[in-house]
Image (cartoon, rainbow, N blue to C red):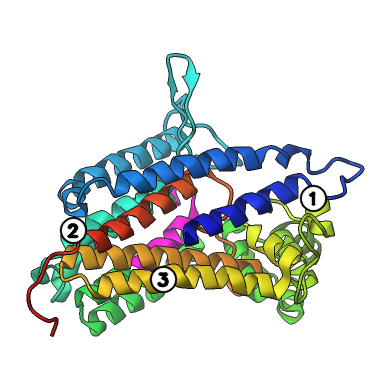
Amino acid sequence: MTALALMAIGIATVYSVGNPAETSPANETANLAHLWKKQIIFAGIGFLGFLGANAINYRRLGALSYWIYAVVLLLLLLLVVSRYIVPLPFVPEIKGAHRWIRFRVAGVQLPQIQPSEVCKLAYILALAWYLRYRSNYRNFRALVGPFVLTLLPMALIVLEPDLGTVVLMMPIFFVMLFVAGAKVRHLAIIVLMAVLLSPVLWFTMMKPYQQARISSVLLQSAWVREKAEAHPWLGKALVGKEFSERRWKNDWGYHLIRSKYAVASGGVTGSGFQQGPFVKYNFLPDRHNDFIFAIIAHQWGLLGCLGLLGLYAIIVACGLEIAENNTDPFGRLLAMGILAMFAVEVLVNMSMTVGLMPITGLTLPFVSYGGSSLLVSMIALGLLNNVGRCRPFTVARKM
């Protein structure tokens, strides 16, 4: 019921941004007017995915997890090949990225899929299956296996590029290792290695627009922007090129500035359903997917945001109960991996809309517009329910 409520909120919000109470003279919302109908179809497909994930015992999926993981890696590899080697007809370029696959069967165009979304769940399944044995994580050398399982899809996804999914995978990795029983000092060593390696990645692999997205957390400060403009070396370190206040407002910081205005203008109770300038006009791009939380805050204010957080808290609480009461290591790890995925997506998406975290492109689970995201979220929820439904039978009290 909680997921249905979240999907209903998402559909209503997508409807409102495409069909405001007052139509703008420039008809700026016309291209979003019918997306709510597609979102209803996506929700129906997602519900079927939820039922499918409950159809068989989750342990059987565990036995197939490496094969699922390998197929997803192959799909990710096709995206990289299309971007860097030879263009493939079923891999479209959208906004400079190669993240989607469109297949046509018998002349019928099938819905496009985003392999990086599917990869999140395939990765959790494979890692949970690998970590179910104690010998796979108790010493530092044994962490090479799960580390490779994590780095392979991350490397392919970052080449699409899709920074959001890459940001998501590392917290899932650490949560599942911690739950599996990995030693804290080993996890701390991995974090230290990542910190030491980050300057190399920053200056050699990241493009200026990616650097600007991450630096936006600091560049919200007028003092930092003033120093970056006065000292070219600092501007280049932050955004990869000479910093400009004008470009910050019109390009690098455009989404963030508008998103914060939308959230702040909602106040305590909001502007009301289908009301408010950020609903009526195209002041905030991507307000139906990545920045949908800002529109919810704009329409329903602080109270609406707290209600939304309460719904996510119910899912997390139920998931923790399922994980705690399952004695199967694979089931417990699978449940915690799914919970980590949901929690990180929610926290990162909400945080980026108010400037607490970089803009990464992570969607808000069950709420943001998008078929792949909604389908994967519903399948993940179905697996979580499967773990709770198919828990091993025990005759002794849990110690």
Q: Give left or right: position of 18 versus 395.
A: right
Of the numbered discs 3 and 1, the one sitting upstream in the chain is 1
Let me know if residue 398 appears in the view. yes
Residue at image point 76% right, 73% down: 269
Asked whether the viewer can see residue 148, the reply is no
Number of the label disc, if any, that sits on residue 129:
2
The quadrant holding residue 314 is: bottom left
Q: Are there few (<14), some (14-19), or many (20+) residues within 10 Å of tag 2?
A: many
**Would you place residue 69 above or below residue 335 in this image?**
above
- Could you say where residue 170 lies in the image, as x and y percent from the top left? 37, 66
**Of 214 and 138, the residue lying toward us:** 138
Percent across and percent down for residue 191 are 35, 76
How many dots with numbers?
3
Report the residue marked by disc 3: 316
Residue type beneath disc 2: Trp
Farthest residue, direction top:
106
Task: State which quadrant residue 384 falls in.
Answer: bottom left
Q: Secondary structure at mark 3?
A: helix
Residue 296 percent coordinates (x, y): 68, 62
Q: Mark 1 or 2 closer to N-term?
A: 2
Residue bounds of the magenta highlight: 158-172
The disc placed on residue 307 is none
Foreground label between 3 and 2: 3
The crowding category of the residue bearing disc 1, from other C-alpha atoms within 10 Å (few below 14, some 14 to 19, many at least 20), is some
Of badges 3 and 1, the one in the foreground is 3
* Secondary structure of residue under mark 2: helix
Main SS class of the magenta portion in the image:
helix
- Disc 1 marks which residue? 282
Dot 1 and dot 2 residues touching (CB under 8 Å): no
* Kind of residue at disc 3: Val
